[in-house]
Amino acid sequence: NQKEKMMMCKYSGRTTKTVKRVEGATRKECVMTRHLLKKWNQSESNQLPWELIDHIMSLAEYRTFLVFEQDEEIEAGNNANVLYLNTGPLRDVANVEKIDIEVISHDQGLLTQGQLNVGTRIGSWTWAECAIIGEDSSEIPIESRPGGARLELFKNIVASKEWTANRVSFDRDSILVQRLKNSCELAIYVRSAFPGWAFHAKKASLTIYYKV
């Protein structure tokens, strides 16, 4: 029970690119399904416990969620700070249970000086960040520290041309979810620093799960 629609993602200094938005079941549909499973056996003594019902729905991936997907392949080098995906205004953020982010990427695939830290993420100067954008288009600080406006998601593996699926999850107690406000947007930026370093991305997704 998924609905798809296309939305436009506006990049700073770049052409507009379409982002796909996929919607899961509505909260009303999830509630109705839970109660139908509960009433499947009319005998009260044999009714399924709510915990088992929720587990069944989780295994069936029948839940309220939103997925935002970007599949444009880009290269961002020379001190890049490129918006790669944004969600548009979000609603009902008080009921967000979890946020999953995945970015498929690699760096420039070589080093010009030395071969230190090759195959690790140590000393990498290409990375991805998540930002919260307010209604006035300004970034809402996520961490209470200097330069903490955005949250670093991951660094690329050093000197690798292999596409890597980088996955990060945030539960409802995380600072990212706690900072969300209605009508704000979530955005994924890809970054690089210093000449010779470049962030290559070919796909990203951001999934928001809501409690029933």
Image (cartoon, rainbow, N blue to C red):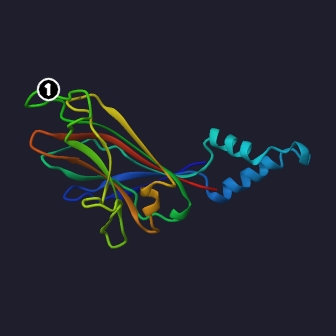
The residue depicted at 83 percent of the width and 49 percent of the height is 39
Amino acid type of the residue that numbered disc 1 sits on in the rendered structure: Gln
Q: Percent x, y for residue 111? A: 12, 31
Left or right for 109, reference 156: left
Q: Percent x, y for residue 60? A: 64, 40
Q: Secondary structure at mark 1?
A: loop
Q: Percent x, y for residue 57? A: 67, 44
Left or right for 113, reference 183: left
Near mark 1 (Cα within 10 A), the count class, few <14, some 14-19 or many ≥20, is few
The residue depicted at 56 percent of the width and 61 percent of the height is 95
| In-front residue for pair 148/81 | 148
Q: Percent x, y for residue 46? A: 88, 42
Q: Name the quadrant of the C terminus.
A: bottom right
Name the residue that disc number 1 marks.
115
The residue depicted at 80 percent of the width and 49 percent of the height is 38
The residue positioned farthest toward the bottom in the image shown: 136
The residue positioned farthest toward the front in the image shown: 145
Q: How many marks?
A: 1
Residue 14 figure quarter: bottom left
The residue depicted at 20 percent of the width and 37 percent of the height is 123
Left or right for 109, reference 164: left
Residue 117 figure quarter: top left
| In-front residue for pair 82/159 | 159
Query: With respect to residue 2, does 120 lie above or below?
Result: above
Left or right for 30, reference 146: right
Query: With respect to residue 123, does 85 lie above or below?
Result: below
